[in-house]
Amino acid sequence: MTANLVEVHEKAKDYDWDFSFTEKKPKFDTKYNIPTKGKDPFRMLVRDYMKMEAEKDDRTHGFIDGALRMGIAEKMEPRFNECLKLTLLDLGNAEYVAVAACGGIISSVQNQELRQGYHAQMLDEIRHTQLEMALRNYYVKNVPDPAGWDLGQKALFQHPGGLVAIGEFQHFNTGDPIDCIIDLNIVIETAYTNILLVAAPQSAVLNGDHALATTFLSIQSDEARHMANGYGSLISVLRNEENVPLVNDALERHFWHAHKGLDALVGWQSEYGSVNRAWAYRDQWQEWIVDDFVGGYLEGLGEFGVEVPRFLGKAVEDLDWMTHTVGQVFSAIWPLNFWRSDAMNEKDYEWFEKNYPGWHNHYGAYWDGYKQLADPAGGHIILQELESLPPICQVCQLPCALPRLDINEFRLVEVNGSQYPTCSEGCEWVLRKWPKAYTRRKQFWHKYHGWDLADVISDLGYIRPDGKTLIGQPTVSPDQKMWTIDDIRALKYEVKDPLHGVCL
Amino acid sequence: MKITVEPFHHEFECEDGETLLKAALRQGLFIRYGCKHGGCGTCKSRLLDGDIDEPPSTFCLSPAEREDDWFLPCVSTPTDDCTIDIGSMGISQEEFLAGDQSREYETRIEINEPLTKDIRRLRLRIVDEDEMKFTAGQFANIQVPGTQHWRPYSMANSPEEKNFLEFIVKIFPEGRFSKLLEDRLNTGDRLQVHGPYGELRIRLSHRNIIMVAGGSGLAPLLSMLNRLAEKGNERPVQFFFGARTNDDLYYIKEIEAVVQTMPVLEFIPVLSDSWPGDWRGETGLVTEALARHRESYRNCDAYLCGPPPMIDAATSLLLERGVRPRNVYFDAFYPATSD
């Protein structure tokens, strides 16, 4: 007969001990005062964990096997899969960093129960990386236009959209381990969990991508454990009143950064990567972030002194325009992308205007112009219409064009005698408070200042196997002639760092 | 009958003819509840499997909710093994297993005075050593002296005011408790109070706050306003308070005092039947004033308390003008029947 779960869990803890011959020091320092008692509400044992996760893996891989035979990869909306070339790469990075994060936390927390919880989470995160790599493997071999899927980690560290994710997810495993927990387990895996892993599968199904839906739902089934780890850690830390202001600062910082980074990428995939949309991204946000996370989760922590992030209202306000501006910027730089950037059509216009009244006034003319310049025979790209390239925010790595070009909140911030661009009051606050975490980042435009656009594309390697056709294209339409590197060279477009001579 | 409660996978037994709520409480489990007679909707839960006997009509469930298998455990008896889901109550497993934390308190009447011709102020001092810890917006049941009947009233004071409970009581000509209050109960008399109950409370968000009160519905909203002021609230609040005539408005000085400490509060009194020549507030039904005041209520949380027709009309209007359905919160108490 199998032994009782609670008894076995208690016995497993007995194998841990305090050293008598040396002081037990955490591997990574923390500014928090962490009690040695905490609670792993799942009491997960390896024997049960393996059985459960193996079953989940079998179901996911089984589906992909079936998807191959049914030719599902050819039936999905090309627009959806193109944007996924960036966003799935970004998410994969999040999973890898989360594996490292759990290692850091386990090495730092002197608390058996919590350590046990994070051990299970670490295995989960590894499973997620494997599932997402298997999905990328499925796409690269089966979608009609796999160009870009094969670039993998290289593009992640090159492209401005990849750097947004690098910037956001680095907080999982750098800095104070408790701050890492607040970002990973509380903000991303609790506040954003439904947006990332429930709305995205819904969107995938509506756009014919059942493989992504199956993979993400399998991942989502592990998230409750991660939320519980985060909650257990937070409650443990909040027992000491001295920790409360530190928790509030970390929550403020990571909530804002997640708003910028995740809302830009996930909102863009949800609205500009979809042909069929379930509901507006800003409505998802109101439902899950404001009403569930703030109105439920944070409210429950109010008695411990946890406060609502003061930038919450600003984040909501941004979402009226943010995804559209990101859609505008990502499409405007289409030759620099490693995916095809589809144009919005009349059906899209109608949906946007209905869900975001006023959209057409601000973005309609842009998309009309974008479509007119799709043909390489025209010899012109929309990038040439911009007065200048947008500076990139030193903190969130997004263009300083948000929330909307005409009401952007770009500001230069001086830190230790140097100037840095930031996109908002929130990012300015983060930069001033934690300057060391951000001031060493290099700017994409700075690297390529003075280069011909064709040389930039060649340097990035975003060219198809024929050696001349670009991976990035301004449409997914099969009827449109594709742009080549020669078409781009003929433009004589020189990249100019908008802050050349101002910021180093 | 065996009852399984999700999301906790917990089972308990229910006797023949026993309501689900009564059986759960008897066995030391906690399910949120309030009036116990199908009048407040606090215990609203979902039937996932099995069969129950339930009253054919209760105002607290819309036809769509009934269609979707929502029911009220306080007035429903199982006729078969059942699985119910109480996930929407937002209670943790610990709270569920800890049992009912609300309890009975002995109180003495401190103040029993008329506020208008048909509304009275009842202020009670808790005699027990323990204070009642409630959240602004919650209610308690007051026992009708000499009977086994209880009547629900919302607390009108701030929870910070320890050991005191203040209620606003509408006097109905045949009301079992309200008539007693008007005719026989005096300062110093004892009253048994059971509570606190209810889910109406200020929700954390970034949104502006709209409050609409009619008649004695001021009570929970006044408690919430006081609490907001104590916490230094900075979210803009618009508070519509409807009555028939100027004589039917009450607690105006108290509300104006809250405006002084919380300048983001805009108080909008509304008179429907008649008003003085120098009247500076709004006129007409409170919902008409609400309609005139703003074209859009997008990005607002709305809190309503008053007669059910007012709640229905205000809810429709607010939803039409941009409030998300989930962000309309209300208490719609129906006068108890003769028992």
Image (tube, coloured by chain):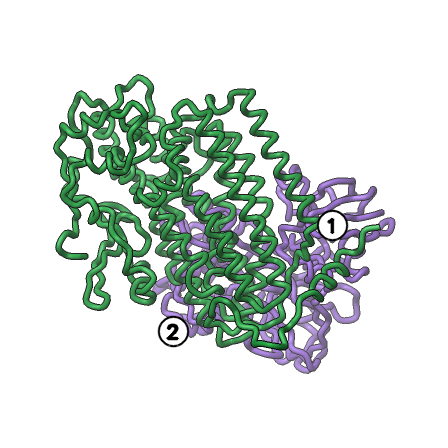
Q: Nearer the viewer, residue A295 or B37?
A: A295
Instruction: Give amino acid for label 1.
Output: His
Q: Residues within 10 Å of mark 1 (few under 14, many from 20)?
A: few
Q: Is residue A262 visible?
A: yes
Disc number at residue B260?
2
Query: Which image quadrant for residue A41?
Result: bottom right
The relative height of residue A34 versus residue A366 in the rendered view (above or below) is below
Instruction: Give amino acid for label 2.
Output: Gln
Determine the secondary structure under disc 1.
loop
Gap in Å between the C-alphas at discs 1 and 2? 50 Å
**Upstream in sequence: badge 1 or badge 2:** 1
Check the rendered structure and report the hue given to chain A. Answer: green
Which residue is located at x 64 percent, y 43 percent? A53
Q: Nearer the viewer, residue B128 or A392?
A: A392
Disc number at residue A452?
none
* Residue of label 1: B9
Q: Residue furthest top?
A: A479
The relative height of residue B112 versus residue A271 in the rendered view (above or below) is below
Closer to the camera: disc 1 or disc 2? 1
